[in-house]
């Protein structure tokens, strides 16, 4: 890793115009030792406190790491660790937070299992990930996360984790393509007024959902979508579960619903980094055109006066329509209705709460929508 071209990390995503971010897959590669999980990187950041003693310890250990998983991780992340710590302090992080977060991470058996990198089934890894969230919340409380993630330290740690091949094999190439945009998407969220606490509330609610746990434990549902034969390259088994997933994870899950309904979507998309992510994710699927034209779709929808609450309530109808033959989709979209958690009815052609209908807000882009749905 020490031989990695650090200039390429600075070019992970160029703001404004110019060339697109350099994918991590094109960076210099090191031989792959036993990969360490992201949580192990967190541990190192937590326990190495900013100070002269720890700084000297880092210099010694980075040149001759000890045996075991911690030594291996130190060797991988040492070029970026001090930079990350300096960036953390510069983003209003404190030593007290580091100590408190370290205590939380090390006191939970499931979290400690993740930190030691032991091989466990996916259900146990999910539990370990969830157990680390309280430590992360403490670590990031009051910190300018939008600034922190744009630093070389975070980008270097992120690239190291992505290079470690921790994701399922079918998802690893996608993660490598998305990696360069991740710091900028996170920063866009905070730039547009996003907050840390509601985000963590939403993530906790998702990870605690039994339906999500069952999906993540089934490799057939989370990998191999491109050859699965479902709509848009989604595996048929997962496609059949989408309405249930939506109801359990969003409609009937207040933390995630409240976070989504207040998310500054238009502002985030207008920052310019969601669209390339959408292009990557939808490449080779029926949603490719939608991904390419996403900024216009979002701007036209919100500028016409429609709300996130409308589309969240009506989404189950559209998800159901995706699974119908094309000849039945138009009738389903125009005849059926969605419902908000408070019981308000949302229809495709009916104004909502004194504002326009969804059809009015999508009208400028119906040609794009007809590439995925038969809307008449």
Image (spheres, helix red, strand yellow):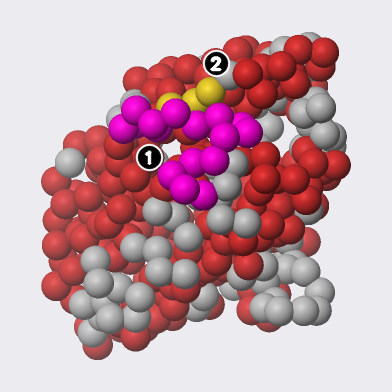
Residue that badge 1 annotates: 257
Q: Nearer the viewer, mark 2 or mark 1?
A: 1
* Residue 189 percent coordinates (x, y): 48, 64
Q: Say whether residue 352 is magenta.
A: yes
Q: Is residue 265 above or below residue 248?
A: below
Residue that badge 2 annotates: 241
* Residue stretch rendered in magenta on the structure: 340-355
* Residue 109 percent coordinates (x, y): 19, 37
Q: Residue at x 49, y 41 (%)?
A: 352
Work out whether mark 2 precedes mark 1 in sequence or the reverse, and give the earlier one.
2
Quarter holding residue 30: bottom right
* Residue 11 percent coordinates (x, y): 69, 76
Quarter holding residue 143: bottom left
- For this view, does 48 lie left or right of residue 24? left
Q: Identify the element where label 1 is drawn.
A: helix
Q: Quadrant of the N terminus?
A: bottom right
Q: Say whether residue 264 is magenta.
A: no
Q: Mark 2 to mark 1: distance in Å?
A: 19 Å
Q: Which sits in the foreground, 200 or 47?
A: 200
């Amino acid at each position: 890793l020490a031989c990695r071209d650090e200039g390429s990390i600075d070019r992970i995503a160029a703001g404004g115009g110019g060339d697109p971010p350099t994918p991590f897959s094109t960076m210099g590669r090191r031989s792959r030792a036993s990969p360490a999980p992201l949580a192990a990187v967190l541990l190192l950041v937590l326990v190495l406190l900013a100070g002269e003693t720890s700084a000297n310890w880092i210099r010694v250990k980075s040149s001759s790491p000890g045996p075991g998983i911690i030594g291996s991780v130190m060797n991988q992340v040492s070029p970026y660790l001090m930079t990350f710590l300096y960036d953390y302090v510069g983003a209003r992080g404190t030593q007290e937070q580091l100590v408190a977060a370290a205590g939380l991470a090390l006191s939970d058996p499931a979290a400690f299992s993740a930190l030691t990198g032991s091989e466990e089934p996916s259900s146990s890894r999910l539990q370990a990930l969830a157990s680390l969230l309280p430590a992360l919340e403490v670590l990031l409380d009051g910190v300018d996360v939008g600034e922190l993630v744009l630093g070389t330290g975070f980008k270097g740690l992120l690239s190291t984790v992505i290079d470690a091949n921790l994701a399922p094999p079918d998802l690893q190439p996608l993660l490598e393509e998305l990696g360069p945009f991740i710091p900028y998407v996170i920063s866009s969220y905070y730039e547009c007024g996003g907050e840390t606490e509601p985000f963590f509330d939403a993530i906790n609610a998702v990870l605690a959902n039994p339906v999500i746990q069952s999906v993540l434990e089934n490799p057939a549902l989370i990998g191999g979508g491109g050859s699965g034969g479902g709509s848009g390259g989604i595996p048929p088994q997962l496609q059949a579960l989408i309405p249930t997933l939506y109801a359990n994870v969003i409609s009937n899950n207040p933390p995630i619903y409240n976070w989504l309904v207040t998310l500054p979507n238009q502002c985030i998309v207008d920052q310019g980094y969601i669209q390339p992510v959408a292009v990557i994710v939808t490449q080779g699927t029926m949603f490719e055109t939608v991904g390419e034209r996403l900024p216009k779709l979002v701007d036209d929808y919100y500028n016409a006066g429609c709300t996130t609450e409308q589309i969240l309530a009506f989404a189950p109808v559209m998800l159901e329509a995706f699974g119908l033959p094309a000849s039945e989709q138009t009738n389903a979209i125009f005849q059926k209705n969605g419902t908000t958690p408070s019981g308000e009815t949302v229809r495709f052609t009916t104004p909502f709460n004194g504002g326009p209908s969804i059809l009015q807000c999508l009208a400028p882009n119906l040609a794009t929508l007809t590439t995925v749905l038969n809307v008449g």
